[in-house]
Structures are given as structure tokens and as C-alpha cells.
Image (spheres, rainbow, N blue to C red):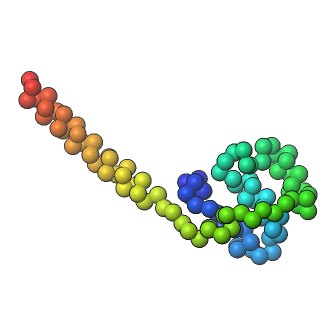
């Protein structure tokens, strides 16, 4: 899930060129990040799967910039630094309380 939040999926037609542009559009619509752009019901999703000839194909940004990959490295580093700092903060607070007493 994190991969989908950070990056665009590899276009299905890059993996298998026999996939139709309409099927690729259906897959992209099903994977939309914004819920209002996804299929609102399973019935509409099934309808498009059954009637692919009626699906309009959009020129999506995801088709052009999917090679640009982002990683969550910065977030991971910040998380680990935060975890490392917790014992130091606790130790400092304990020293401060001990000196006050």
C-alpha cells in the first residue's frame, strides 16, 4: 500500500503488451488514490470489465512518469532518529527530576 501511495504503478501494457488500452484504463481507475475517481460500486467495475469497448481511454500522467520512483527513506530515517532520541529524553528528564529532589 505504501508503494501505491508514493509511486505510480507500472503500466500494465509495459508488462504485457497484449493488454488493451481499455483494460489498462480500467486497472488505473480501480487503483486511483482519490476515492472519488475510483469505481463507486463493484457493479460499475464489473460493467466496465464486461463492456471494455465502452470505456474511454484517458491520457494519464501515470503513463508517463511511472519510472520516477520515490522511496520512504527520509520518513524511515526520521522515525529511527525519533526512536533513538526517546531514551535520551527520558534519561534527561530523570536526571532533572533527581536534581530537583
**Which residue does the image show at 73% across and 59% down from the upper left?**
28
Q: Is residue 55 left or right of residue 14?
A: right
**Which residue does the image show at 18% across and 34% down from the upper left?**
93
Q: Is residue 97 above or below residue 72?
A: above
**Which residue does the image show at 51% across and 63% down from the upper left?**
70
Residue 35: image location, x then y, percent: 69, 45
Residue 36: image location, x then y, percent: 72, 44
Residue 58: image location, x then y, percent: 78, 62
**Which residue does the image show at 75% across and 59% down from the upper left?**
27
Question: Which quadrant of the structure image shows residue 48?
Answer: bottom right
Q: Is residue 5 left or right of residue 60?
A: left
Residue 55: image location, x then y, percent: 86, 59
Question: Which quadrant of the structure image shows residue 17?
Answer: bottom right
> Is the C terminus in the top left, top right, bottom left or bottom right quadrant?
top left
Q: Nearer the viewer, residue 67 or 92?
A: 67
* Residue at the top extreme, as displayed: 101
Amino acid at each position: 500500500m505504501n508503494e501505491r501511495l508514493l509511486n505510480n504503478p507500472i503500466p500494465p501494457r509495459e508488462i504485457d503488451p497484449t493488454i488493451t488500452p481499455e483494460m489498462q484504463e480500467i486497472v488505473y481507475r480501480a487503483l486511483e488514490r482519490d476515492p472519488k475517481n475510483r469505481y463507486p460500486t463493484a457493479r460499475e467495475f464489473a460493467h466496465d470489465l464486461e463492456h471494455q469497448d465502452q470505456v474511454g481511454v484517458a491520457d494519464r500522467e501515470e503513463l508517463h512518469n511511472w519510472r520516477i520512483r520515490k522511496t520512504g527513506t527520509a520518513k524511515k530515517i526520521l522515525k529511527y532518529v525519533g526512536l533513538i532520541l526517546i531514551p535520551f529524553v527520558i534519561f534527561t528528564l530523570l536526571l532533572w527530576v533527581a536534581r530537583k529532589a
